[in-house]
Every structure is written in C-alpha cells, then in structure tokens.
C-alpha cells in the first residue's frame, strides 16, 4: 500500500480539543451535541475553525485551521468556543474539559448516530462503551516524509512529560482512581491505540497498514490511534497522548512544547545527527509512571536508564529549547509549562477541590466549568467552599 504524505509548512500547528457538554444545573453530561451542531452548521461553514461531533453525543470537538504559530491556532480555538457558546448558553449547557468526567456513568451515555461509531462499539463492546474520555490532538507540520518516524520515535521519550502536564482524569465514574491520568490507560484498550510501534521509516508504516487492512483490523490510516501518529492527509505528526486540557492557556502551552520539540528534532536531522530513542520497554514504563503519578513521576531519560523527576527534566528542556521557542514565536505560550509546574496540573487541582468539598464531585465539576471559562481559578473556588 502506497500512502502519500501531504506537503505541509514546516512546524505549522493545528489543534483539536474535545469538550464536554454538561447540564448547567446538575453538572452531569448532557447528550445535546446533535442539536447544537445542527444550529451551528450554517453559522460556522466559512470559518477557519470547525465544530464537530464525536463518539458520544455529550461531546463536541473544536478544531483550528492551520496556524503559522501556536497563537494563531489558539485564536481559532477561542473563536470556535465563542461560537459554540451562542448555542450552549441559551440551553443552560456548560462547557468543560478534563480527561474524564468526575462522576458520569458510561451506561447513561448515547453513541453518535454514525456508522463508523456503531462499528467501533460493535467490535469493542464494554471497552468501547466505556470510552468516556476527552483529549487534545496537536498537529505539527513536517517538511520531509523521511523525518516522520525518526521524530515520532524521539518524541516517544517525551510522552510522559506531555501526559503528566495534561493529566486531568483522577476520577472515573465517581471513584478516585489513584491515577493522575486514568484516561490514558483506558484509551489504550482500543485496537490500534496506545504507544506507537517503533518503526524505522515510512515504508515500514505502509507495510504495517498493509498487514492490518489486509486482515480487517483497519480500513485506513485514520484508524491508527497511537499516542503519536503520522497524519498523512495533513503532512503532520499528531500527538494524541494528552488528557483533555482544562484551560485554553494550558492547551497553548502543551502545543508550544510539542511544536518546539518537533522543530528541535527536525534541525538535528538536518545536521545529520541521530536522534535519541529509548528502548520500547522504557517508553512503556514511562507512560505508566506518568499515568499513575503525574508530575510526581520519575522518568527514564536515556538508554542507560537514568531516572529524574519529570518536573526537573521539563525545566531543563524548557531552558534548552528557549531559543527555538522565540524563533517560532511561541515563547509566551511555552512559558505556561513553567506555570503548570509551579501551580499544579489539572488532576492536582481537582483533587484539592474534592478534598475541600468532603469528596463532593459536583464541586469538582463546578470548578472545571469555572476554569474553562476563565483559566485556573482554584484559589477562588476553594474560598467559596468555606473550608
């Protein structure tokens, strides 16, 4: 199978953000996406952004146009959310985002009426119906198909960093899981999801697709659901490992980190240098550690097995890549990573709210709704609980 890799501008950026729809009174998930999307279809048909449905009717996805910068892509997302609110606000529907909803139950949710979704549920059964998960996808343009898999393999060493920064699913169906990102471990139960296979080049990827299409596992490359995957149609590498970010500044920060890492690796390849790749067993262990411990994880950072706190390694990476961020005009957005390291990730904020509210997860939902509207407001929210 020959799979063409589209031409794209080097280090251009595209963003996708899956958002929950929640009842304004109860905070529970609201299966209202079909009517909202129908109302917005004509209004948004000529915009750079898109607003579309997802597997479950409690979800909408907002997608940017192709941005020269993270700021441009983020502006598209902000415009999409503003348009979305014209339909949700009159219906008393709130928007929020995290890797999981704190207390919603899978058996209360409805599947969007599309053949591809019904086929997925038919095949995956209980695991598919449990996919109450929300994430972000960051696309970065790559100028040469021969760079795609070397960069993906190098990026795999940074999956725990991205997963820890975005971790926002400490609760599942009303239970405290003990994991910072329960979503990441649930999602990998789907066929073709999880860590990317360590392929060497594009021809091996075409062979992988040949094997799985030929055996009926896949229909095409869009059904490859790896944590990092090539997106041939767009000419990008797509990072899909992250939980749903709870605020727009945090989304922009993670997007900036992905952009500078891809550009950094691309420059190393231009210089004829070999990129660092970790053994697959280290990559797998790092993913589990980030899911379990979030920003408290110790990660394996080289082939010798050196282990350091993920926060320490992130600060080192930020310093090393600062010049590239300036060149890509995303230094301001990238500085949001340090803010998360200083103030905590979404999973930490959610746990603090739950503790202050004696375990009342409705308060966690209120907190997430407030954050989505105005950025991190943890201190204000805690003060309203009177604890």
Image (spheres, rainbow, N blue to C red):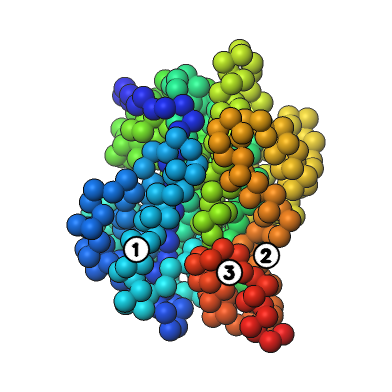
Name the disc covering residue 84, or none: 1
Give whichever of 28, 109 is nearer the camera. 28
Give whichever of 259, 26 is nearer the camera. 259
User: Which element is circle 3 on?
Assistant: strand
User: Which element is circle 2 on?
Assistant: helix
Name the disc covering residue 230, or none: none
Give whichever of 243, 194 is nearer the camera. 243
Question: Residue tagged by mark 2?
Answer: 348
User: Which element is circle 1 on?
Assistant: helix
Discs 3, 1 touching: Cβ within 8 Å: no
Which residue is rendered at x = 50% and y = 42% of the image? Answer: 70
Q: Residue 155 sits in which quadrant?
A: top right
Question: Residue tagged by mark 3?
Answer: 171
Q: CA distance from mark 3 to mark 2?
A: 11 Å
Report if residue 102 is visible in the image: no
Q: Residues within 10 Å of mark 1 (few under 14, many from 20)?
A: many
Q: Residue 20: image x %, image y %? A: 42, 66
Which of the two discs, 2 and 1, sits closer to the camera?
A: 1
Q: CA distance from mark 2 to mark 1?
A: 28 Å
Discs 3, 2 touching: Cβ within 8 Å: no
12 lies left or right of 361: left
Q: Is residue 32 above or below residue 53?
A: below
Give whichever of 164, 82 is nearer the camera. 82
Report if residue 275 is visible in the image: yes
Which residue is rendered at x = 44% and y = 77% of the image? Answer: 28
Q: CA distance from mark 3 to mark 1?
A: 26 Å
Q: Residues within 10 Å of mark 3 (few under 14, many from 20)?
A: many
Give the residue at the far bottom of this rendering: 386
């Amino acid at each position: 199978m020959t799979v063409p890799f589209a031409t794209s501008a080097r280090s251009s950026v595209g963003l996708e953000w899956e958002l929950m729809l929640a009842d304004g009174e109860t905070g529970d998930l609201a299966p209202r996406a079909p009517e909202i999307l129908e109302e917005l279809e004509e209004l948004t048909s000529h915009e750079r952004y898109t607003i579309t449905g997802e597997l479950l009717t409690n979800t909408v996805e907002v997608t940017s146009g192709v941005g020269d910068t993270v700021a441009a892509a983020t502006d598209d997302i902000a415009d999409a959310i503003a348009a979305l609110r014209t339909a949700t606000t009159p219906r008393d529907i709130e928007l929020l985002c995290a890797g999981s909803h704190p207390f919603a139950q899978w058996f209360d949710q409805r599947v969007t009426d599309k053949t591809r979704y019904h086929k997925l549920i038919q095949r995956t059964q209980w695991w598919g119906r449990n996919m109450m998960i929300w994430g972000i996808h960051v696309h970065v343009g790559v100028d040469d198909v021969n760079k795609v898999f070397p960069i993906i393999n190098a990026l795999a060493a940074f999956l725990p960093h991205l997963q820890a920064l975005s971790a926002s699913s400490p609760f599942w169906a009303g239970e405290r899981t003990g994991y910072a990102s329960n979503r990441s471990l649930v999602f990998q139960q789907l066929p073709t999801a999880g860590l990317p296979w360590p392929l060497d080049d594009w021809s091996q990827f075409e062979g992988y697709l040949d094997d799985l299409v030929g055996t009926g596992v896949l229909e095409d490359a869009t059904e490859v659901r790896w944590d990092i995957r090539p997106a041939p149609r767009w000419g990008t590498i797509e990072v899909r490992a992250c939980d749903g970010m709870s605020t727009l500044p945090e989304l922009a920060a993670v997007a900036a980190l992905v952009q500078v890492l891809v550009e950094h690796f691309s420059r190393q390849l231009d210089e004829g240098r070999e990129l660092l790749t970790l053994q697959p067993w280290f990559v797998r262990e790092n993913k589990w550690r980030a899911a379990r411990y979030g920003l408290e994880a110790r990660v394996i950072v080289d082939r010798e097995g050196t282990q350091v706190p993920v926060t320490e390694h992130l600060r080192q990476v930020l310093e090393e890549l600062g010049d590239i961020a300036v060149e890509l005009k995303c230094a301001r957005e990238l500085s949001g990573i340090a803010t998360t390291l200083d103030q905590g990730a979404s999973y930490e904020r959610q746990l603090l709210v739950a503790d202050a509210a004696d375990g009342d997860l409705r308060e966690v939902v209120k907190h997430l709704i407030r954050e989505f509207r105005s950025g991190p407001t943890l201190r204000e929210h805690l003060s309203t609980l009177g604890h």
